[in-house]
Amino acid sequence: MSEMIRNNEEKQEILKEIVTNLNEGSDIKSVRKQFKDIIKNVSPEEIAFMEQSMIDEGVPVEHVQSLCDVHVKVFEDTLEKQKTGKALPGHPVHTYKAENIHLRVLIKRIKKELRKIVKGKSKESFTSILNDLKKVEIHYQRKENQLFPFLEAVNFTGPSRVMWGKQDEIRVMFKEIDSALEVDDMVLLKNNVNKLLKALSGMIFMEEKILFPTALRKLPEASWKEIRRGESEIGYAWIKPGNLWDPNIVKTGVPDFAKVAAEARKARGEDPLSVEKETSSADKNDREEAGQIPLDVGSLTGTQLNMMLKVLPLDISYIDENDRVLYYSQGKERMFPRSPGIIGRTVQNCHPPKSAHIVQKIIDGFRNKEKEEAEFYFTMNGRFLHISYYPVYDENGVYRGVIEAGQDVTGIRALEGEQKLLDW
């Protein structure tokens, strides 16, 4: 075993050397020739672990992200031959791959429309396909909010952070294409679309040859069941998941949610016995009604408190003193996508790598009692949004976390005059 570990460590050092040589300008062909024995035997996990170890050693995520396309290119031929594992319809991986099939079709279609629009043809068909292509955002949001948290729970964080950064680059590319369309610059449009399609194709390759095979081997069945149950909170791009793989069916053929929850928490390193046994929602409500939650003024049952928080026109989240997300409100309309996968996740990992330092600055300011509020407001999709962060301290003044409150204030901003009477 020690020999195997040593050999694995040596291989990891060689893989890092390959990436370093590429960063310093080495030719891909010469690198492939020099390290052909290593390259031809590399696995998806080894590439993912190499990225992870580079980040753990202090290499900035953005730097690993910038090298991502190049080092994937070096290992492309080997990864292409890898068996990636199969998943039944309904399994999250099968759904991701089904979306990728549709994405490939859209890539081919928009290439054809690009040639037409550059020659002066109508923009209508191109714009329609472009808008359809933008639904890939749902695919990415589901990865970021529902798949990545479970990978983080098994210490598989580096590659997902790199991939999130690459997805942010793609989001910027969509905006650049919109800008080129607005000014009717066909040369710029062509360059931006080609750049986008290359990035989208590269992301498909990284998902199917590195991310999904590794995730299938690292995550237990219980985690995949939790992932599947939370996916509907985000939604799906272009397709509906199949039903051959059912997350609610256990070996007995009867759903056993208590066992599922215990297995998932055990997989995350938590004590499965500390989890209260799940029962029907009616039984749960009866237990809550039996005991009031004492508040500073008055008291509420858990059911009443939950209903109150759901009806407020706010997005509310609570992050504890250990930077873990413990709660988010289930309102009718949400400003940003959220799913159950983020519960227990560090708040830093709930944001793109490029903005994680801002989150950390806010937390540090609150923890050190240097600041009492952080405020942001901006326009997104034609709506004016306001987000505030507040520190939470207990009666002894000890820091206990952060409350995030977000609201769509578009209508409030537009108010004029007064209204003191009921208008309905």
Image: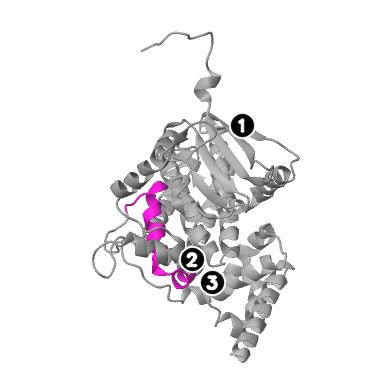
Q: Give the residue type that dot 3 points to.
A: Glu
Mark 1, other Cα within 10 Å: few <14 / some 14–19 / many ≥20:
some
Q: Is residue 220 above or below residue 195?
A: below
In terms of image quadrants, where is residue 273?
bottom left
Instruction: Answer whether labels 2 and 3 touch (C-beta < 8 Å).
Output: no
Q: Which residue is mark 3?
A: 76
Q: Which residues are magenta?
A: 211-240
- Residue at left 74%, top 41%? 369
Query: Residue at the spot x=43%, y=72% of the render?
Result: 84
Where does the C terminus fall, quadrant-wise?
Answer: top left
Q: What residue type is disc 1 on? A: Tyr
Determine whether, in the image, residue 366 is placed left or right of residue 315.
right
Mark toward the start of the polypeptide (3 vs 1): 3
User: Residue 42 vs residue 112: left or right?
Assistant: right
Marker disc for residue 271: 2
Residue 121 image-quadrant placement = top left
Q: Nearer the viewer, residue 11 or 245?
A: 245
Compared to residue 73, the image places residue 293 above or below, namely above
Nearest the viewer among 213 and 176 is 213
Label 1 element class: strand
Label 3 sits on a secondary structure element that is helix
Q: Quadrant of the N terminus?
A: bottom right
Q: Is any atom of residue 97 visible in this view?
A: no
Spot occupied by residue 378 in the image (x, y as percentages of width and height): 60, 32
**Residue type beneath disc 2:** Asp
Graded by Cα atoms within 10 Å as few (under 14), some (14 to 19) or many (20 or more), the crowding at tag 2 reads: few
